[in-house]
Image: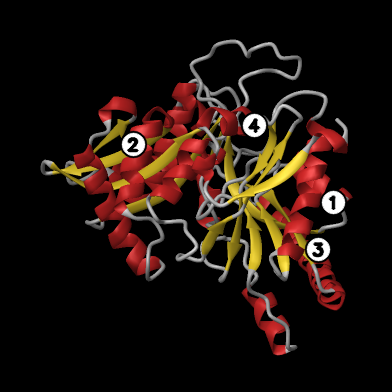
Amino acid sequence: MSSDTIRLRVESNITALPAAQWNACANPTNDLDGVPHAKTKKSPGNPFVSHEFLSALEESGTVSARAGWHPQHLVLEGEDGQPLAVCPAYLKSHSQGEYVFDHGWADAYERAGGQYYPKLQVSVPFTPATGPRLLTRPGPHAPTARRALAQGLATLCDMRGASSVHATFLTETDAAVFDAEGWLARIDQQFHWTNQGYGSFEDFLGELASRKRKVIRRERRDALANDIEIRWLTGKDITEADWDAFFAFYMETGSRKWGRPYLNRRFYSLIGERMADRILLVMARRAGRWIAGAINFIGADTLYGRHWGCIEDHPFLHFEVCYHQAIDFAISRGLSTVEAGAQGEHKLARGYLPVTTRSAHFIADPGFREAVAAYLERERAYSQEAQAELAAHAPFRQDTDEP
């Protein structure tokens, strides 16, 4: 791929690209040699970088320049004018909705006389889930295209007068590209569940220490006391009435947890129209009405847990709806992983183990970059130690445990 045959452009609205063109880069259906993947019952790729999800954020008004998320999507075109690669990027006037926290960096830079905002954010808004960010069509050009996107982001930073670029929740492949371009590496952790070929939830429990098994069985039993029933809704089973109920849960819990929830009601209708087959609602009903629920997104091999909410408080219902039911569903679908969202050491006791998450940061000011680099070196050491300590407390059976 020659630089004479490609060009980079910036789009301020994802709908400027047809869904098929964006998704051919974001969730390609062909292998590297152009041969279609074998047909499976699994959902394609990563749901969050799909045109359907990102366009729903923009069309609902949840993501916009007015909301402090001004789309600046990079598009790498070949000589035929077709996109070879794309990158979801946003010019931001704040640091909300990102889950990789840089408020301290902003405060320090501005105390030193700099201007931290605007900055560029390469991510899926409001979504702390690892996934591809340098999205390329399959083929031998892909490594060069990823590098071109990373270099283009640094150029765009200068063009927009931004202080920095932040690419968050990266795959190892994308993290390596940014590292090669000299960006600063940052790590953190989340808690994920891994399917070891279990045939049932009981098979999974059989791998836990006896005391942990008993605790989870009691939790599951107590969560369904008071005649609570759980249902899985996906695809055509999800109605607008169900979205009304779930949005009420989201607003009730989100308002207490964050002060102002990020997503609006129209966003849920749009994803319900466009990608219902890639959504799992785990809903709890009591006395004839929905009282709690969690939304999950179905990827090719991963179930991504996102939001939970309730309008009635019941012991252990949160753990049942968000964690235990997600494992049940993953086992039933043959999914390899459940990602249960950001933070939450309480997930460890329920079989979700610590894994590393990655981000990369381009800092334009050399002096500020040096200070951030020193901070990140210390932070990485701390994160690695913390992850090792948590992993040592995993709930799985040791050789000396009772069966």
Does the CB distance between marks 4 and 2 fall below 8 Å? no
Residue 8, given in percent of the width and then of the height, sits at: 73, 44
Please name whichever residue, 145 or 27, is drawn nearer the observer in this view of the structure.
145
| Mark earlier in primary sequence (3, 1) | 1
**Label drawn at residue 381:** 3
> Can the viewer see residue 49?
yes
**Badge 2 or badge 3: first in the primary sequence:** 2
Give me the C-alpha separation between circle 2 and circle 3: 42 Å
Residue at which label 1 appears: 179
Q: Which residue is mark 4?
A: 25
Q: Secondary structure at mark 1?
A: helix
What label does residue 121 carry, if any? none
The span from disc 1 to disc 2 (Cα, nearest Å) is 37 Å
Mark positioned earlier in the residue sequence (1 or 2): 1
Q: Which residue lies under the disc numbered 2?
A: 272
| Residue 257 pos. (x, y %) | 39, 66
